Image (cartoon, rainbow, N blue to C red):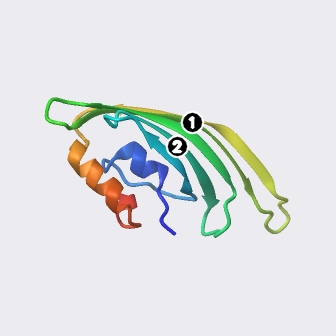
Amino acid sequence: MQRWLPGAILALGCASAIAQPLTFDGGVSLNNTNNTKVQRLANVYWETNQTASGTLLAGESIRYGSTNQVISLSFAGQLQFAVPGSGTNGPTIYYGLIQTSRSGACFPSKQNRQDRQGQNSDEDNND
């Protein structure tokens, strides 16, 4: 199963995540013709579970500079998932909004991003 992490999308190689209890897989990802807008509907997985715990509906806006480098990125969506009970804690349903944006020089080129999207292996998802 090939999963992607929100940190991989949001940081685009600029930072490492401290903890990654959620991963995302499957669903639908729609790009516009110039890859500046992406809509995602994905399954949410809690920790190492092999069964989806919920869904993510999100959108990305990407701006490219004159040499196809990413100069800004915004990501916003809604997330809902359930965590099974453990010990004396019962199951819990979580829901909320996620939003972030970033501008600056810490982005790979547009071509590198497209290459990574085509490969989409587990190693590439940790960029």
Say which amino acid is labelled 1. Answer: Gly
Q: Position of residue 121 (x, y in %)?
A: 38, 66
First of labels 2, 1 by sequence position: 2
Q: Are marks 2 and 1 in contact (CB under 8 Å)?
A: yes
Nearest the camera: 95 or 24?
24
**Image check: 121 left or right of 25?**
left
Query: Residue placed farthest to the front in the image?
Result: 33
Q: Position of residue 71 (x, y in %)?
A: 26, 32
The amino acid at mark 2 is Arg
* Residue nearer the viewer, 127 or 85: 127
Q: In this picture, is 112 found above or below 119? A: above
**Where residue 58 appears, x then y in whole percent?**
54, 38
Q: Foreground residue, 40 or 97?
A: 40
Q: Which residue is mark 2?
A: 40
- The structure residue drawn at horizontal position 61% and vertical position 45%, both measured from the top left corner, is 56
* Quadrant into which the C terminus falls: bottom left
